[in-house]
Image (cartoon, rainbow, N blue to C red):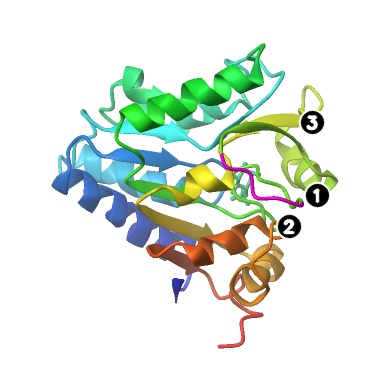
Amino acid sequence: MKYYVLPDENAIGQAVGNLFCDLVRQKANAVLGLATGASPLPVYARMISQCEAGEVSFRDVRTFNLDEYCDLPQAHKNSYRTYMRQELFDKIDINSQNTHFLDGNCSDEFAESERFRQYVKAAGGIDLQLLGIGRNGHIGFNEPSENFTQEPFKVALTPSTIAANSIYFDDIPMPKYAMTMGVGMILRAKQIVLIATGSAKADAVKAMLEGEITPRCPASALRQHPHVVAYFDPSAAALLRK
Ligand code: GLP
């Protein structure tokens, strides 16, 4: 896996935002895999500023988000749909009908998995997938486990993930389950870009790049993909050997 260490999150946001904008300029109906959390925010800021400047249009772009909480109303302020609207979709010229999410409130998780899988397939697959990384090495909401899961599935969140994300929930307890793309689906993206910033990610970054490839560190699977590039700030890269 190729990686770059850039000075800070804004430099990373510019670099990764440019990757997305360049792709969309080359392929107007590109299929983007999108992520939530703090890490992507500077990327989305770059995409918004490029769109506002008239340098790129997302009119024909299709998007698929990695994951969504279960048992949380879609319109709740902490749903990933709300996040995406507030942080990106409402600020660019995307057609909201082209934005797709797993339904965390579905009654049949297997039918929902198949629905989402078919949508991605019909779109021609994901051209560029954006990822953050959890402190325990999770990607999307693929928590450390005994197997790499292929297709979207319902996952029980770990105490580490609940602790990290609970800070965003001030009115209700954080959901304990989520629907997420499986590692297999993430690896089917044609290109992947991962961002990690801050010292809290240093152990996960080291395990991803230098540990064994194991579902105990879901991000380690990315080393099997031929077109992954990661961007770290110096704190996230601090424990790497070189
Ligand atoms: C959540 C999301 C992940 C994200 C991770 C890290 O668990 N499901 O997609 O990568 O948080 O988030 P942050 O970038 O806020 O550290």
Q: Are marks 1 and 2 in contact (CB under 8 Å)?
A: yes
Secondary structure type for disc 1: helix
The residue under label 3 is 176
Please state the horizontal and vertical placement of residue 20, each as a whole percent of the image. Answer: 30, 49
- In primary-sequence order, the first of circles 2 and 3 is 2
- In primary-sequence order, the first of circles 1 and 2 is 2
Q: Nearer the viewer, residue 188 or 88?
A: 188
Could you tell me how many numbered marks the image carries?
3
- Residue under the image location 47 percent in, 31 percent down: 84
Q: Are marks 2 and 3 in contact (CB under 8 Å)?
A: no
- Amino acid type at circle 1 is Ser
Indicate left or right for 62 with 172 as reference: left
Can you tell which quarter of the image residue 111 is in? top right
| Label 1: how many Cα within 10 Å (few below 14, some 14–19, many 20+) | few
- Amino acid type at circle 2 is Asn
- In primary-sequence order, the first of circles 1 and 3 is 1
| Label 2: how many Cα within 10 Å (few below 14, some 14–19, many 20+) | many
The residue under label 2 is 136
Q: Nearer the viewer, residue 63 or 93?
A: 63
Indicate left or right for 55 with 178 as reference: left
- Residue under the image location 66 percent in, 45 percent down: 142
Please state the horizontal and vertical placement of residue 40, each as a whole percent of the image. Answer: 48, 48
Q: Which mark is residue 28?
A: none
The residue under label 1 is 160
Looking at the rendering, the stretch of residues picked out in magenta corresponds to 146-150
Secondary structure type for disc 2: loop
Q: Nearer the viewer, residue 206 or 168?
A: 206
Can you tell which quarter of the image residue 197 is in? bottom right
Separation of marks 1 and 3 at Cα, in angstroms: 12 Å
- Amino acid type at circle 3 is Lys
Can you tell which quarter of the image residue 135 is in? bottom right
